[in-house]
Image (tube, grey):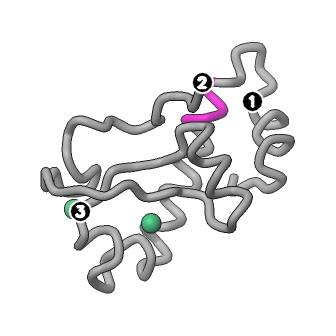
Amino acid sequence: MPKPSLYPTDRGCFVCGNPDTVTHHIYPGYGRRDISDEEGCTVRLCNFHHNMSDHGVHADRRLDSFFREDCQRRWEEREGTSGDGHRAFLERFHITYL
Ligand SMILES: [Zn+2]
Ligand SMILES: [Zn+2]
């Protein structure tokens, strides 16, 4: 069973609130895309903030970095109940963005 998303799924685009959204997988690459699904590292974005403009997460490195870092913090907080979230993230994703 995939874990619930670390971001709200019922409030439209996380950036602008547009109700018409797609699911963005926060960590790239084939392996990590599946892990993103399993670990809830997904966020709802409208087309504009996904990939339809320079401001979309697939074109805007700052927005992309924001989600990679913010999602890692959220994941470490949720999973690291005994203070080992950072190490657990490294073991799960084999990379760190913090
Ligand atoms: Zn948006
Ligand atoms: Zn995407």
The boundaries of the magenta stretch are 74-78
Q: Secondary structure at mark 1?
A: helix
Identify the residue under disc 2: 78
Q: Is residue 12 left or right of residue 2?
A: left
Q: Residues within 10 Å of mark 3 (few under 14, many from 20)?
A: many
In the depicted structure, whether residue 88 falls above or below residue 54: above
* Three-letter code, disc 3: Cys
Q: Is mark 3 within 8 Å of ligand 1?
A: yes
Spot the residue most to the top.
Answer: 82
Circle on res. 50: none
Identify the residue under disc 3: 46
Residue 96 location, quadrant = bottom right
Check contact, mark 3 vs mark 1: CB within 8 A. Answer: no
Q: CA distance from mark 2 to mark 3?
A: 26 Å
Q: Is residue 72 magenta?
A: no
User: Measuring 43% from the left and 82% from the top, which residue is drawn there?
Assistant: 59
